[in-house]
Image (tube, rainbow, N blue to C red):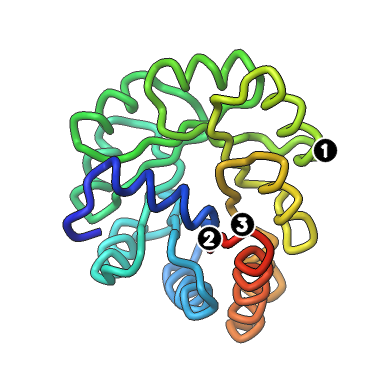
């Protein structure tokens, strides 16, 4: 994240549009699985703070200037500060908390709060959120994004669940600003088996498909 300010981070996220998001109970698995995702082509990555020693992982990966590293499940101002101190250049939360938005602004990092309804999304957008994380995932992400953006095209919606290799291009074509991959990239079976080669292959498939059809990645 060296020498990138908040606006530059937002612009790069908008350009790359793909994010790898990991949530696990094992630090070593998180490290190795994310290493595989990066090897497969992901350059925007997120460690949820529910992952053991997430701050240490953020610091480790933030040392790579080719990556944008974020902290997920940020629920307090202290967590926001600690995450940025570790090297996070964007913060993600499952909810919209104005206090965290304010902290992110003071810290000079991007903020992506969770929202589900059009009212929640517009509220977060008008308050200054850089993107809105679509959470929880609706039954049909493509249809939901299309429906919301029809009357509210100014929203930068970033689904982080319900997106897969099969529908990622359609989600982005529907107007989503980006797409986050969680279990569909870090499949539980692969994680349990330490099958990092499969994670790397899946990452490469996602990045290659989105790049070929949309120039994303």
The Cα–Cα distance between marks 1 and 3, rounded to whole angstroms, is: 16 Å
| Precedes in sequence: disc 2 or disc 3 | 2
Q: Which mark is residue 20?
A: 2
Report the residue marked by disc 1: 139
Say left or right for 177 vs 144.
left
Q: Position of residue 15 (x, y in %)?
A: 46, 53
Q: Could you tell me if the residues under marks 2 and 3 are in contact, i.e. CB atoms within 8 Å?
A: yes
Circle 1: element type: loop
Residue 194 at least partly seen: no
Number of residues whose C-alpha sits closer than 10 Å to that of mark 3, classed few (under 14), some (14–19) or many (20 or more): many
The Cα–Cα distance between marks 2 and 3, rounded to whole angstroms, is: 5 Å
- Total residue callouts: 3
Q: Could you tell me if the residues under marks 1 and 3 are in contact, i.e. CB atoms within 8 Å?
A: no
Circle 3: element type: strand
Q: Nearer the viewer, residue 55 or 124?
A: 124
Q: Residue at x 19, y 60 (%)?
A: 2
Residue 123 at least partly seen: yes
Say left or right for 119 vs 137.
left
Q: Which mark is residue 181?
A: 3
Number of residues whose C-alpha sits closer than 10 Å to that of mark 2, classed few (under 14), some (14–19) or many (20 or more): many
| Precedes in sequence: disc 1 or disc 3 | 1
Question: Vertical placement of 190 versus 114: above or below?
Answer: below
| Precedes in sequence: disc 1 or disc 2 | 2
């Amino acid at each position: 994240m060296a020498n990138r300010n908040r606006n530059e981070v937002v612009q790069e996220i908008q350009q790359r549009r793909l994010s790898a998001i990991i949530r696990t109970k094992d630090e070593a698995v998180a490290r190795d699985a994310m290493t595989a995702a990066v090897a497969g082509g992901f350059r925007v990555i997120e460690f949820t703070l529910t992952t053991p020693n997430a701050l240490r992982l953020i610091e480790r990966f933030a040392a790579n200037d080719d990556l944008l590293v974020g902290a997920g499940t940020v629920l307090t101002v202290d967590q926001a500060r600690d995450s940025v101190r570790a090297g996070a250049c964007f913060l993600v939360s499952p909810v919209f908390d104005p206090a965290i938005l304010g902290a992110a602004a003071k810290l000079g990092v991007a903020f992506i709060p969770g929202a589900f309804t059009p009212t929640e999304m517009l509220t977060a957008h008008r308050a200054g959120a850089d993107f809105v994380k679509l959470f929880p995932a609706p039954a049909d992400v493509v249809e939901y994004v299309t429906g919301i953006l029809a009357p509210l095209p100014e929203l930068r919606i970033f689904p982080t669940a319900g997106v897969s290799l099969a529908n990622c291009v359609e989600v982005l074509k529907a107007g989503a600003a980006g797409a986050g991959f969680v279990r569909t990239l870090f499949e539980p079976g692969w994680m349990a088996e330490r099958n990092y080669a499969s994670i790397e292959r899946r990452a490469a498939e996602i990045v290659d498909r989105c790049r070929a059809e949309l120039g994303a990645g």
